[in-house]
Amino acid sequence: MAERLEKIGVNCFLYRRGESPVPIHVYLSEKLSKTFTETEALEQLYNASLLPGVVGPVIGMPDIHTGYGLPIGGVMACDYETGIVSAGAVGMDINCGVRLLTTKIPAADVDKAVLTKLLEAIARRVPAGVGRVSQVKELRRADLEAIAAAGAAYFIQKGFGRREDMERIEDGGCIPGAEVAAVGKEARERAEQLATIGGGNHFIEIGRVAAVLEEALAAHFGLYKDYIYVLIHTGSRGLGHQICTDYSNRMWANGERNGVRAPVKGLACAPIHSNDGQNYLKAMALAANYAFANRQLITHFVREAFVEVLKKPEDNLGLDLLYDVAHNIAKKEKHGSRWLLIHRKGATRALPAGHGDNPGCYLATGHPAIIPGSMGTASYVVVGTGAIIKTYCSVNHGAGRVMSRKKARQEFSREDLRRQLGGVVVAARDINLLKDEAPLAYKDIDAVVATLAEAGLTKPVVRLEPMGVLKGEGDEA
């Protein structure tokens, strides 16, 4: 374990560094702490603690690994009146997130032949891979003003989804305050990728509910053992990437004028209420609403593919939206009596039961937080407990990498990848180009999820296991 990590609670460590003005907490299980070597990620948490208006603790999740500026698996809270916003602390893929569909389809009814047909039907509708654009020409010329104003609801009203979907998307699928005018020309020109999943760790997965860990909660969520689910993991694609690039450059260049200087360019920032700060939040909200719309459109095409292959009405198949959560976002939230801007980069919000920001259908339980693993390993649905306030109601967003993409490509052969995937069916143009996504390039998802559960911050509801996955090649995490 890295030096200067001092255990202060169950699976919680304090990163001691004398100059840090606020505490830095890192959550690691005993198993993860024994192999923890993420010294660069700790350095990034330390750099974040030096920014103006940051409120302690700065937090590292159990899936923490080095990112751009703030580590992936990082949570940073800033006082909303005196603090800053950082484009890099949100990340390149603004509102990268995940949604889960439940079904009425027994896993026993979906053999490899049917699974292959389903993945092929989805792939015909949803392009995968870096740089891929919308299959439907009309979606390449999407109305950004309408998306800014309504997010996912804009497409639901046009027939791409169900009215009840809106209640089961974080923020109803629309973050207020988005403005197209805050987005540069180059970024707007990249907004041609709706209904696509991109590359990197993005995917569409079909699997089965392998274990029910909390029966009452699982039943409330419509999750039953040995039934099919669908996971959709993607974000704002090139639009969000360009917005992050543009505003990181702008914030860095204008640091002196704005009166703030970040220790590294990856944390370039501006006061929340400065012109740069407000314009970034307007641009970020547009990208977030675009991502909600993207996942909504993909959901529509997934439902369409299931109906085509299984030859049953949609009502008979279920394919109900459980929830859609963001994990690269900055949001104004009230914690205690204080308004904060919470940066979650590779971290997922998990509001506990009774929290007023839950949708009505989940007020009594807390909303589901969806934690995907790698393409060959398990995923989880969890809920936050009352103690989740220690992390500003945040949980990890996935397993977290233990190996860089470059190293994974060098380390694993095509045969290694196939062995690691076991019986999981992979739909991809060339599986050899997915070696950087090999399961062994990631941490043990079971140990990662157990970290916060053992600390009393989360309650795992179900464990999910993949049967088939649609992936696109290219470095886009």
Image (tube, helix red, strand yellow):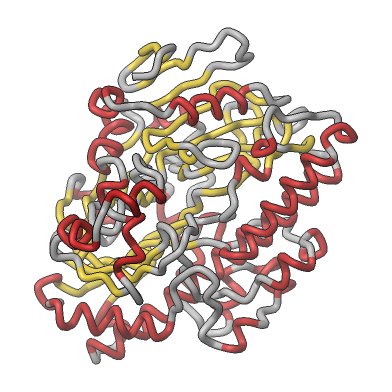
Q: Quadrant of the N terminus?
A: top left
Classify residue 84 by image quadrant.
Answer: top right
Report the residue at 29% width, 39% height from top: 449
Report the residue at 26% width, 34% height from top: 450
Q: Residue furthest left?
A: 108
Of residue 91 and residue 464, the one placed in the foreground of this image is: 91
Classify residue 149 by image quadrant.
Answer: bottom right
Q: Residue furthest right?
A: 257
Of residue 214 and residue 30, the one placed in the foreground of this image is: 30
Residue 13 versus residue 313 in the image, above or below: above
- Residue 85 appears left or right of 58: right
Give x and y (percent) for residue 228. 21, 68
Can residue 364 be seen here? The reply is no
Residue 312 versus residue 343 in the image, above or below: below
Residue 252 versus residue 147 in the image, above or below: above
Classify residue 126 by image quadrant.
Answer: bottom left
- Residue 348 appears left or right of 90: left
